[in-house]
Image: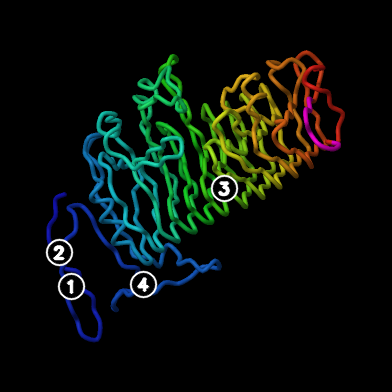
């Protein structure tokens, strides 16, 4: 990192000068309200108690000259300068390349205004040796966001540069026990509180787009997530829109997702979920889970309300999924509501799957899931299936090893191309609110 010395002069009753080093091409500007007096983090507040953008000291850094010009050290410096009430601005029309594993500071009251592009290199050999590792499904990431009161917003893009990863992973499976081809997650929070992401685009993540870990009160609003490949034989895989682990308070609103896997998929120990105005195309649906994967481990998902969701051209629509097999865990999914869901050209519009992941019927029967599913409502679900499952538009099959109760369907108007519409229910306790048949009779 190239540096030079400069003087920042702050005028007070007694004029003083403070010397410090900043990277070449970087700058720090002080809000006009603070000019003529030292800046001690005094900020005007909005109605939510956060300081307004205009009242924050702003840090800019130089942009990358090309796709190999790494500015990761400059970026860390900028975040450090923005602690306790500052703003880092990545400017429109500029690209900022991250080419190294970096330890971000633990942030406190920091805004990142992303109007340009924050782009990660596609040096697969480097990133498969240099990453942050999470044992849940052998997850890795480029860098970790932690701290409190973090706001990332703007009209820019966080670019995972995923094409090389899609090409290299073709034919592999993320859950294959022998897989060592780890792909980075684009955006990961850990030990974070009050994180707001607004307006930006997440593009071409190598693996999951977002993974929220040990995080409280995280929200996404007006976000666009896309993953596409220029190679028809190597499509994006496992590029989920939203995944979570040990999260309390997850909100997604006014968001569009166009990826080849789960649109929204909170994983173990996620509670207090709110989703509204979510559009998903070509995905595996809005899923609760999967949970119950690891032997002896208690997993749960609870208190989720999802409304005004559009699901197009996908594998699944509204889905609950839990593991079965000889070496799995246990847990529960409870108090889940899907309301006002529009589904079109989707293989399985409503599904309760307790034989995840690719467990055959014989093994699933011998080693059923131990995840209880209770108090789940599907209200006003309309649209059409693709016809892949014949006339079946909803398949609610509970494991004989679990309890499934309080499952209610209301206002269901789903059709299939062959003109029939069947709802399957197996091992469900009580009335589900609509006529249903067993899987054997479907």
Q: Which mark is residue 18?
A: 1
Mark 2 to mark 4: distance in Å? 21 Å
Q: Which residue is mark 4?
A: 41
Q: Circle 1: is it few (<14), some (14-19), or many (20+) Cα within 10 Å? A: few
Mark 1 to mark 3: distance in Å? 48 Å
- Specify how the rendered protein is coloured: rainbow
Q: Position of residue 241 (x, y in %)?
A: 52, 37
Q: Which residue is mark 2?
A: 6
- Left or right? Give the position of 404 relative to 95: right
Mark 1 to mark 4: distance in Å? 17 Å
Q: Which mark is residue 39?
A: none
Front of the two marks 1 and 3: 3
Mark 3 to mark 4: distance in Å? 36 Å
Q: Quadrant of residue 150?
A: bottom left
Q: Is residue 282 above or below residue 8?
A: above
Q: Which residues are magenta?
A: 424-431
Q: Position of residue 41 (x, y in %)?
A: 36, 72
Q: Position of residue 3 (x, y in %)?
A: 14, 55
Q: Which residue is mark 3?
A: 269
Helix, strand or loop under label 3? loop
- N-terminal of the pair, mark 2 or mark 1, is 2
Helix, strand or loop under label 2? strand
Helix, strand or loop under label 1? strand
Mark 2 to mark 3: distance in Å? 49 Å
């Amino acid at each position: 990192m190239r540096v030079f010395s400069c003087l920042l002069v702050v005028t007070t009753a007694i004029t003083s000068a403070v010397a410090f080093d900043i990277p070449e091409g970087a700058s720090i500007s002080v809000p006009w309200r603070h000019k003529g007096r030292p800046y001690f983090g005094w900020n005007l507040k909005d109605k939510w108690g956060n300081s307004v953008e205009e009242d924050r000291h702003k840090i800019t850094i130089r942009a990358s000259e090309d796709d190999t010009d790494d500015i990761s050290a400059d970026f860390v410096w900028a975040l450090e300068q923005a602690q306790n009430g500052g703003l880092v601005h990545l400017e429109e029309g500029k690209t900022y390349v991250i080419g190294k594993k970096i330890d971000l500071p633990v942030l406190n009251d920091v805004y990142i205004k992303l109007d340009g592009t924050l782009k990660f290199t596609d040096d697969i050999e480097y990133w498969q040796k240099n990453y942050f590792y999470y044992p849940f499904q052998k997850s890795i990431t480029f860098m970790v966001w932690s701290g409190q009161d973090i706001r990332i917003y703007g009209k820019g893009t966080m670019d995972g540069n995923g094409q090389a990863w899609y090409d290299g992973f073709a034919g592999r499976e993320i859950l294959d026990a022998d897989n060592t081809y780890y792909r980075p997650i684009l955006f990961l929070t850990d030990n974070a509180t009050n994180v707001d992401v607004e307006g930006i685009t997440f593009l071409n993540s190598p693996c999951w787009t977002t993974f929220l870990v040990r995080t409280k009160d995280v929200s996404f609003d007006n976000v666009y997530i896309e993953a596409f490949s220029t190679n028809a034989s190597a499509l994006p895989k496992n590029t989920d829109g939203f995944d979570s682990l040990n999260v309390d308070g997850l909100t997604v609103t006014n968001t569009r997702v166009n990826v080849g896997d789960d649109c929204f998929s909170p994983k173990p120990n996620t509670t207090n979920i709110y989703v509204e105005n979510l559009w998903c195309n070509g995905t595996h649906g809005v899923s609760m889970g999967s949970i119950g994967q690891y032997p002896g481990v208690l997993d749960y998902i609870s208190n989720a309300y999802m409304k005004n969701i559009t699901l197009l051209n996908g594998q699944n629509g509204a889905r609950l999924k839990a593991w079965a097999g000889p070496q799995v865990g246990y847990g529960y999914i409870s108090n889940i509501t899907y309301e006002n869901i529009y589904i079109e050209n989707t293989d399985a519009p409503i599904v309760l799957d307790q034989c995840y992941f690719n467990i055959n019927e014989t093994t699933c029967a011998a080693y059923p899931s131990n995840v209880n599913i209770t108090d789940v409502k599907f209200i006003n679900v309309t649209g059409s299936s693709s016809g892949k499952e014949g006339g079946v538009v909803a398949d609610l099959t509970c494991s004989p090893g679990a309890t499934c109760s309080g499952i209610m369907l209301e206002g269901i108007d789903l059709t299939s191309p062959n003109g029939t519409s069947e709802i399957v229910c197996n091992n469900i306790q009580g009335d589900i609110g609509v006529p249903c048949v067993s899987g054997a009779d479907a």
